[in-house]
Image (cartoon, rainbow, N blue to C red):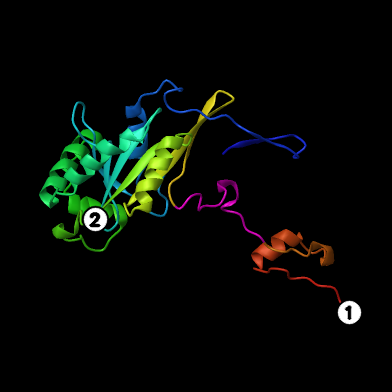
Amino acid sequence: MLYKLSPAIDRLEPLRFIDFAQAEALEKDLENLIADHLLETLYERDPLLPFFQERSLQAEADIYALDRDGNLVVFELKRAGAGRGALEQLFRYVEIASTWDYLTLNRKFGEYSAKRRGEVVELREAHRQAFGLVDQIEEDVFNRRQRVCVVANSAEDNLIRAVSYWRDRGLDIDFLPYRLYEVAGDRYFEFFSKPFDPHLNPAFAKGVLFDTNASYDVSGKEPWVQRMITRKRVAAYFTET
């Protein structure tokens, strides 16, 4: 949740969020947004390599991706108004995808990379490069396991309950919420990939903290900040007793 802070810093006002339908955007817009940022932005500690997306008028899930170990991750995205029935078709897609061998995965990745990136790269090598591996993983390692991710607006209570029901019964499925905010004419996209919010506030990520003890600096030869930096000192000064 995003909150507006009062000028006196004594009150929080939760900001209204919307979904892609209210933003007059298509589900395909959400699909492309997620697919284009799975590897480097949305999943900071557990990146994913997308290799295929839903085609028009085809019985397919929205996004298919691979994790570092070559396991299949299937995404179903809902712009708005998703209910329990949304999972039934998803399970059929996953069942079909679980039978894909490496040749099928590589063919789909070739079609995808040619369309999205204008180049054709062999999947094993693309996977090695994407995850910084020393060696390519073997063909028979790919798609040994499958997991499901349902992405929808965080207000989709019925869908959240349905996902929780199947997860409690052992299915490897997660609900990943998003929120879309409109603030002062700009739009902000909030996405909760797991683990949720693991990073520090970017505004403070590159700071350096040290104790200057400036009150005990009486030499006056050069600015105390400059002296501590050039001489690599931390908490260098003290009072004499």
> Is 202 a magenta residue?
yes
Q: Which residues are magenta?
A: 195-209
Which residue is at a point 55% across and 23% down the rendered structure image?
185
- How much space separates mark 1 and mark 2, taking CA atoms? 68 Å
Q: Main secondary structure of the magenta part?
A: loop
Residue 131 % position (x, y) = 30, 55
Label 2 sits on what residue type?
Answer: Arg
* Residue lying farthest to the left in this orientation: 103
Image quarter of residue 225: bottom right
Which residue is at a point 17% across and 43% down the rendered structure image?
96
* Residue lying farthest to the bottom in this orientation: 241
Residue 80's place in the image compared with 137, above or below, is above
Q: Earlier in the sequence, mark 1 or mark 2?
A: 2
Residue 10's place in the image compared with 134, above or below, is above
Residue 97 % position (x, y) = 19, 45
Query: Mark 2 packing: few (<14 Cα in 10 Å), some, or many (20+)?
Result: few
**Residue at label 2?**
145
Residue 230 in view of the camera = yes
Residue 47 in view of the camera = no
Residue 209 % position (x, y) = 66, 60
Q: Quick one: 185 or 79, which is closer to the camera?
A: 79
* Residue lying farthest to the right in this orientation: 241
**Residue at label 1?**
241
Is 62 left, or right, of 80 in this rendering?
left
Residue 181 % position (x, y) = 53, 30
Q: Quadrant of the N terminus?
A: top right
Please tell me whether mark 1 sits on a helix, a strand or a loop.
loop
- Labels 1 & 2 near each other (Cβ < 8 A): no
